[in-house]
Each structure stands twice: as C-alpha cells, then as structure tokens.
Image (spheres, rainbow, N blue to C red):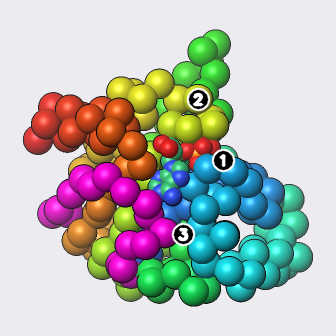
Amino acid sequence: MVRVRLEQGDITGVEIDAIVNAANNSLLGGGGVDGAIHAAGGPRILAACRELRRTTLPDGLPTGQAVATTAGRLPARHVIHVVGPIHDPREDRSDLLCSAYVNALRVADELGASGVAFPAVSAGAYGWPLDDAARLAVTSVLTATTNVRDVRFVLFDTRVHQAFTAALAAAS
Ligand code: ADP
C-alpha cells in the first residue's frame, strides 16, 4: 500500500528517488514547474530530453505518457517527465490525467524508485479545475499497482494544497 503525503513547497528541492515534471509534448522545456526543474537542475536534463527526441521520441512525449531522465544537479536522483492533458470543457480527458500519474509510477518501478514526488499535473497552465485535478491525482495514486511506497504531492501554493487535502480526506 502506498503512503501518500502532502506538503506545500517547491518540488525542485525535494530529496527523493524521483520527482515528476509536468512537461509538455516537446520535452524541451516550458514554464511553471517545468521551467523551475530545468532552471534548478541545470543543462544535463535538457540534454537528456534532446537525446530522447533524437532517438526514441522523435515526435515528442504523447499526452498521458511518462519518461525518465537524469535529475542533473537536483537532490532527487531522477526526473520523470509526464505530459498532462490540457483541460477541455467540451471533452472529458480525465483518463489521460490518470494515465500521467499511473505511467509515472510505472516508470518509477522500472527505475527501482520507492519514493516519488508529484506536482499538481495539469493544474497550472493546462487549466484543469483544481478540485478535479486533485481528486484524479489522489485516486490514481491510491489505486495504482506499484512498488512505490512513498508518494509526496509537493504543492506550490495554499490553494492547491487545500484542494489536495480535501481530495485525500475524501478518498481515504
Ligand atoms: P501544467 O502545464 O501541467 O498545468 P504547470 O507547471 O503550469 O503545469 O502547473 C502545474 C502545477 O505546478 C501548478 O499548481 C503550479 O502552481 C505548480 N508549480 C509551479 N512551479 C512549481 C514548483 N517549483 N514546485 C511545485 N509545483 C510547482
């Protein structure tokens, strides 16, 4: 059974086996948590992403999928990049948001990681309503089949932290 903890803060400073990046399909950097991870982790992360684009992912990382790179200078050992869906009120894309979490845990298993820290994927620039993003995140992690034992949601501001607190209380 995975243990889920919530904290408020900056995911780039977390010492854990793997942190998850809310990347975009290009894998070549962006704003929000993606920009923060590349800025703090240094150029080795981007170099690894470029190498993935040159080799196994020429068209980029599909939405809902996950792939790992070095964490460069970060205290974490690995970065697991996922692409969450952009929220679209005309189409239910919840399954893709759940897949982003489940596939991140699958990649963590492949890495032998027992601790993984997640940001609130899709809850920033990708516009997902916060309460729903939190509910899908928490239920995806709690129902996943994984060897990961320790999941930390590292939430950047009070509002997001409150939404995850409510979602975790409702789910457990
Ligand atoms: P997306 O494009 O998937 O919505 P964003 O990076 O825009 O990704 O936002 C996802 C969440 O990450 C938002 O709640 C945002 O506030 C948060 N965030 C931004 N920077 C950091 C950081 N350094 N650590 C943790 N969370 C962060």
Residue at image point 75% right, 61% down: 29
**Residue range highlighted in magenta:** 1-17
Query: Which is nearer the eye, 132 or 142?
Result: 132
Q: Is the CB of the residue bearing disc 2 within 8 angstroms of ligand 1?
A: yes
Q: Does the magenta stretch include residue 35?
A: no
Q: What residue type is labelled 1?
A: Thr
Q: Nearer the viewer, mark 3 or mark 2?
A: 2
Q: Position of residue 25 (x, y in %)?
A: 75, 53
Which comes sooner in the sequence, label 2 or label 1? 1
Q: Residue furthest top?
A: 90
Q: Distance between the residues labelled 3 and 2?
A: 21 Å
Q: Name the residue under label 1.
A: 63
Residue at image point 35% right, 78% down: 16
- Label 3 close to label 1 by CB (< 8 Å): no
Q: What residue type is labelled 2?
A: Gly
Q: Where is residue 84 in the image (x, y as percent from the top left)?
A: 59, 45
Query: Looking at the image, is 141 positioned above or below residue 45?
Result: above
Q: Mark 3 points at which residue?
A: 80
Element carrying mark 1:
loop
Q: Nearer the viewer, mark 2 or mark 1?
A: 2
Disc assigned to residue 127: 2
Q: In which quarter of the image is the N terminus?
A: bottom left
